[in-house]
Amino acid sequence: GEDYKATIVGTDPTTDIALLKIADEVAELPYLSFSNSDNIKVGEWVLAVGNPFNLTSTVTAGIVSAKARNIGIINERAAIESFIQTDAAVNPGNSGGALVNTRGELVGINSAISTHTGSFEGYSFAVPSNLASKVVRDLKEYGTVQRAFIGVSISDLNPRLADELDVKVNAGVYIGGLSENGAAEEAGLEKGDIILAINSRNITKSSELQEIIGSKRPGEKISLKVLRDNIEREFEVTLRNVNGTTKRIKKADLEFLTLLGGRFREINAEEKSDYRLKYGVKILEVNTGILAEQDIPNGFIITQINEQPIKSVNDINKAGLEIPKDRPVIIFGVLPNGREKYYAFGF
């Protein structure tokens, strides 16, 4: 093989995928075609390609053991784990290599193994090609992944939970909660609903739902079949971005908001009246980042950042990006109990 210099176009920690661009002027390189990973069947033969233990271009064979596996290895809030599980031998050095079908088409990108020894024990996992393809397109076009959110807390519906809820199905995705003003709440979904299908595709577990939503962009619409009070209902949901809007986000727009680590929206008329404010942006959810580190709570309304008025989510990012690196950030606003408070920190 040959070595090439490359630059990083973008990364997506939530799927453990990065996109590189070869910097050198080279002749056209051979490439793999992406297959539709939704069509791969359990029991189908696959080949894993990689460089385990520095053994260049090693190929191993196996079958697809399962689909939509969640093994809890990606430590990110919006992690999408819906792996293709295979028994093709994969070891350190295989990560990032191709998982192909017998026609030589890419069905997944090898990502992980489940092991007690550090070496292959019969369980390896690959990111499905459909999800990888979407991530690559987003990174190429926007520099960051256009992650869509439905705005629900979910868990798998198993027979025991189905019995407790006295429902007529024993597989699906149970909605345990909804994000305030999120896509699902706006569409009319409720806590206790059970998602049975998305766009006519039956859903039996949370990882399947996460994979489908992960392949969409903010602003796209999905059709949900939901069980409520043992009656099937249909809902159309318009997916949102991390900030609760349907806009596509470019990499430059994410920098300060990503550091803060939260989900925001402009305050509504009722909140303006209750808190006697003319404007402000409410923190709907605190995730990993500065907000959590500074103990800034959910429900805090940001009215100023370094004396700049904050009337929209974009104002937060704009104000943050204008702060010199040697100056502290001062966030002023109102706590949920109505008391004014400010937070100061460096970044």
Image (cartoon, rainbow, N blue to C red):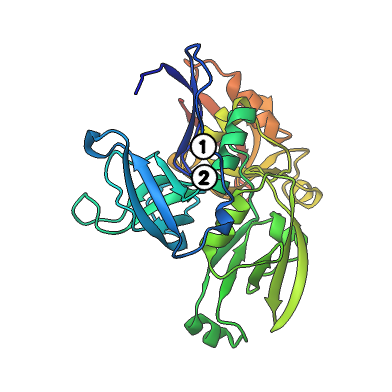
Residue located farthest toward the right when viewing the structure as drawn = 269
Q: What's the residue at 69%, 54% (across, down)?
A: 182
Q: What element carries label 2?
A: loop
Q: What's the residue at 61%, 85% (across, down)?
A: 167
For the residues labelled 1 and 2, the Cα–Cα distance comes to: 6 Å
Name the one closer to the observer, 130 or 329.
Answer: 130
Task: Say above or below: 218 vs 167.
Answer: above
Q: What's the residue at 69%, 72% (across, down)?
A: 226
Which mark is drawn over residue 298?
A: none
Q: Is residue 12 left or right of residue 189?
A: left
For the residue carrying disc 1, how many other residues have a C-alpha within 10 Å: few (<14), some (14-19), or many (20+)? Answer: few
Task: Say above or below: 168 vs 287.
Answer: below
Name the one closer to the observer, 280 or 195.
Answer: 195
Residue 86 at what x, y percent from top left? 38, 57
Residue 71 in view (yes/no):
no
Task: Say above or below: 104 vs 316.
Answer: below
- Residue that badge 1 annotates: 32
Task: Say above or below: 69 vs 269.
Answer: below
Q: Quadrant location of residue 249?
A: top right
Q: In this view, does 71 lie to the left or right of 153?
A: left
Residue 330 at what x, y percent from top left? 55, 28
- Residue that badge 2 annotates: 105
Residue 174 at what x, y percent from top left? 58, 71
Q: Quadrant location of residue 109?
A: top left
For the residue carrying disc 2, how many other residues have a C-alpha within 10 Å: few (<14), some (14-19), or many (20+)? Answer: some
Contact check, label 1 and label 2, Cβ < 8 Å: yes
